[in-house]
Image (spheres, rainbow, N blue to C red):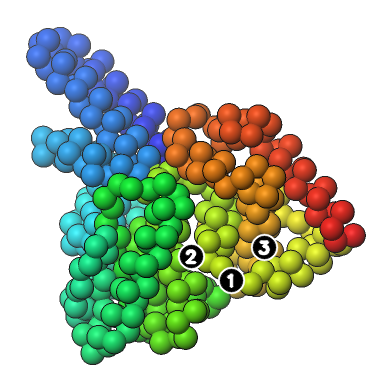
Amino acid sequence: MLVRDKITRTFIFLFIILISTHFCSAGEYNRLQEIRSNINTGIVLYNEGRKKEALPYLEEITDSGIVLPDVYYVLGEIYYEDNELQKAIDSWEISQSQSPKDVIRTKITKAKKELKVDEKLSNKISCNFVLKYDQDDAYSSELVLHSLVNAYNVLAYDFGWYENSEFTVILYSSKDFSDILNVPSWAAAIYDGKIRIPFQYASMNIDELESIIRHELTHALIHHMAGNNVPAWLHEGIAQHKDGIDDTAAKEVLRKAVNSNTLIPFNQLKRGFVNFKEDSTKVKLAYAESLSFIEYLINNYGFYTIIDILKNFNNYTSLDELFISVYRINLNLLENGWIEQLMLEYQ
C-alpha cells in the first residue's frame, strides 16, 4: 500500500493541533514542528526503501506518546520486513484501532498465521541472507542458500549494487505457503519484502530452482534500490529478464494479443498481477508484455538505462519525468514505439 498520499492528512491533523494551541509556548510550538518534520522524513525514507533510516524518526513519534494511525501502519511494515512479527502485529493493531481498514485487518491475520509457522522454523545465516526453513529439510536449505549466494553475486554486479543489504528467505510447505499468503495457484514463489518459496519448488531440478531464485532476488534488489512505488510491469519485466526462463510461450501470448488487439495498457499494470486472481489469460499477457517491453528498452537503449531508472527512481516526482530524463522521450511514446515493433513482428 502506498503511504505517501497519507502525509497530507497527517499534516492537516497536526495543523489543527497548532491552531487549537496557538497560545502555546515557543518550546511547545517547536516541538510540534519537529514532530511534523519527523513524520514527513520517516515516511519519505520508507517509501524510498530506506527503512533503517526511517525507523528512528517514526519510533520517536510513538515513544513520545502520540498515536497517529499512519505512523503505526508504516512501523508495522518496517517491523514486518525485518521479521519482527509480533512488533508488526502490535503496531498494525494500534493503527487499526484508530483507523480501521480492511487491508490492515488482512495484514494482521496474515502475520499471526506466519508467526505460528515462524516459531517452528530454523535459521541459517550466510552472507546477505537469513534463511528460515523446516529443520527436517537441511538438504534443501543448503541447496537454496548456495543458489542464493551465487545468484546475488551475479545480480549485484549486474545492477552495480554494493551496499550491505540483508534479505530474508523463507521455505514453506505447500500448505503453509497457500494458507498464509493466499496467493493464486499460478504463483511459483513471491517477494513481498521477503522471498518466499513453497517447499515443492525447493525440490525441483537445480535449473528451475535457480531461475525462481534469480527472479525473486531481482525483485528484492529492485525494492532495495528503488523503494516501494515501482510499478508491477517494471518489476516483473526486469525479474523475467534476469531469471533466464525461455520466452517462447510469452512470445506466442503476445502474438495472439497483437492480432486480436487486446494488449493491456501499461497504466493498467501498475499494481501486482496477483490482482488478476485466477484469470490466467490476463496474467500470462501481463507477464509477457512486461518482459517484452523491458527487452525492447534494453535492445534499443542498453541495460544501463534500466539501472539509471532504478537508481534515480526517487529523484523525480513522476514516472514520466524519470523516463524523459533517461530516454529523452516520455513513457507513452516509448510504449507506442514498442507496440509498433510488435505489430511489425507479429502481423
Distance from label 3 to label 1 (Cα)? 12 Å
Residue type, mark 3 in image: Ala
Q: Quadrant of the C terminus?
A: bottom right
Q: Are marks 1 and 2 in contact (CB under 8 Å)?
A: yes
- Kindly identify which residue carries mark 3: 288
Distance from label 1 to label 2 (Cα)? 9 Å
Residue occupying the point 45% across, 30% down: 315
Q: Is residue 54 above or below residue 183?
A: above
Q: Secondary structure at mark 3?
A: helix
- Kindly identify which residue carries mark 1: 245
Query: x, y percentage for residue 7?
Result: 36, 32
Query: x, y percentage for residue 293?
Result: 67, 52
261 sits left or right of 72 in the view: right
Distance from label 3 to label 2 (Cα)? 15 Å
Residue occupying the point 65% across, 46% down: 297
Residue type, mark 2 in image: His
- Kindly identify which residue carries mark 2: 215
125 sits left or right of 15 in the view: left
Residue occupying the point 21% across, 78% down: 121
Query: x, y percentage for residue 93?
Result: 24, 55
Residue occupying the point 25% across, 86% down: 138
Q: Is residue 162 above or below residue 331?
A: below
